[in-house]
Amino acid sequence: MIKPKLTPKQKALAINLDSSIYGTFAEIGAGQETVRHFFRAGGASQTIAKAMSAYDKDFSDAIYGKEAKNRYVTQNRLRKMLRYEVALIEERIPRENNPGKKFFSYANTVTTINFDKTTKGHGWVGVRFQNSENEEYNEIIIHVKFKETNPTLQQETLGSLGVNLIYGAYFYTDNPRILVESLYDDLSLDRLEIDMIDFSGPAFKYVDNRLMSLQLVKLGMTDAVIFNSEGNNMLPADILYKKNIFAVRGSFRPVTRVNIDMFEHGLEMFNQDNSCDHENTQILFEITISNLRAAGDIDERDFLDRVDILGTLGYTVMISNFSEYYRMVDYFSTFTNQHIGVAMGVNNLLDVFDEEYYKNLPGGILEAFGKFFKKDMRVYLYPYKNPEDGELLTSENLKVQDNLKELYKYFKLNKRIVDIHNYNPKFLEIYSREILKKIVTHELGWEEELPKSVAEMIKERGMFGYKELTFEGLN
């Protein structure tokens, strides 16, 4: 039996009627929209210790301290607010006089859509809470982007989201997946986007935040999530804003010498073409949801194996629902107007020039190309060796459909598609599917087709079906 979803009023009342839950609300930038639900639900006197809105920056600074570059809608600001308010409760409410109390602090720092509608509105929302009076505090932090174009509607959305978050913290802690889904109770995906979530604390010590990020993409709450080589969730806007972006797409199951060869030589050309350096360039290894669904639903262990390998190699990973390349490039362009480069193999470029992929677009392939080949975007093409006849395919002899030949020539002539010349010919006969078969069937030689550290990691952790042979297995 499916449990019916509760309204914000029902959730607020359930919390108010639980005498053990007690805390504060600090809301900056969009009114006291969350705490309003608790006041209206009734019975709030035993739940709400304090509700405040420190709108004035000077007053806010006097409470929480100044922020670098005067940026107030940041994760750092939110965490300061949460920890300051919890410390204040601990200081002012003696535990001995309040046995059984589970303290919490809810906070948000948000900017809604402006009068000219040039900024859509976004913000940070979080809760710091206890599951029992003697437990260390847990935190759930999320970043949201509003999709509505009316500030009043955005405020109402924020209020419902806040109630869902607090209720989830106390009633769904043992099931973070359900908690993530419940954030949209009484809300719809066209009202807001959640593009980052972070769980921490003793209640979530077994929670992998990368899997929680994957849930955001799977459930359609966001189009893409990013985590760095240490596995930490990153806000896309923080690492992509005004950066040159170089991306490599693949299944990376596993990462092969071909992937690294394509990446290294493609990046070298990208940097030379655009005078880029490490400081102003963001490198991404991108995996689409469609690449994760090898057969049926996503194998989460397999997903983490791929991400762990890329992280070990020092790369930042993006997981997206962009099955088409143009959607990925279009996404990048929302954060930057700098140079964008994409390294891909010949087979992938053939897919880009397949009109079947764009049937659902009103403008068809021309609309897709308008978004894909944006200003300063360039494809770095890695050759493909046909295993049947040994023919080497490059941009020079690539065959596209007759009606697209002139369009292809245009992009080629204007150097929007360029060949990677400095590749290693020895790697052209490496195919990831063949490597996977060798790993499972214990064929010899697959290790040489992967970076050394990758092969070692696969063996150490038994990834991709690898099992160490015993004497019994050899008989």
Image (cartoon, helix red, strand yellow):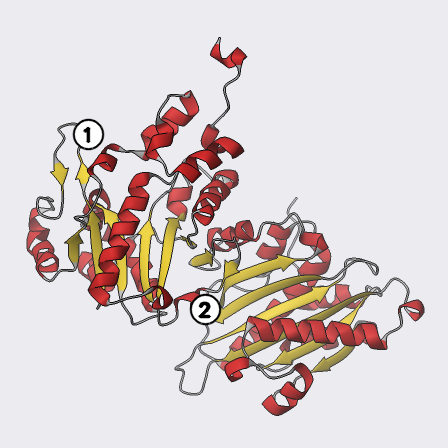
Residue 291 position in % (x across, y down): 38, 43
Q: Which mark is residue 387?
A: 1
Which kind of residue does numbered mark 1 sit on?
Pro
Position of residue 433 in the picture relative to residue 212 (left or right): left
- Asked where in the image residue 109 lies, by quadrant, the reply is bottom right
Q: Which mark is residue 238?
A: 2
Q: Is residue 195 above or below residue 418?
A: below
Q: Nearer the viewer, residue 445 or 290?
A: 445
- Asked where in the image residue 423 lies, by quadrant, the reply is top left
Residue 43 position in % (x across, y down): 81, 73
Q: Secondary structure at mark 2?
A: helix
Which kind of residue does numbered mark 2 sit on?
Asp
- Asked where in the image residue 95 lies, by quadrant, the reply is bottom right
Q: Is residue 80 above or below residue 366?
A: below
Residue at 63%, 78% (x, y): give it: 33
- Residue furthest out toward the top: 475
Query: Which sits earlier in the primary sequence, circle 2 or circle 1?
Result: 2
Q: Secondary structure at mark 1?
A: loop
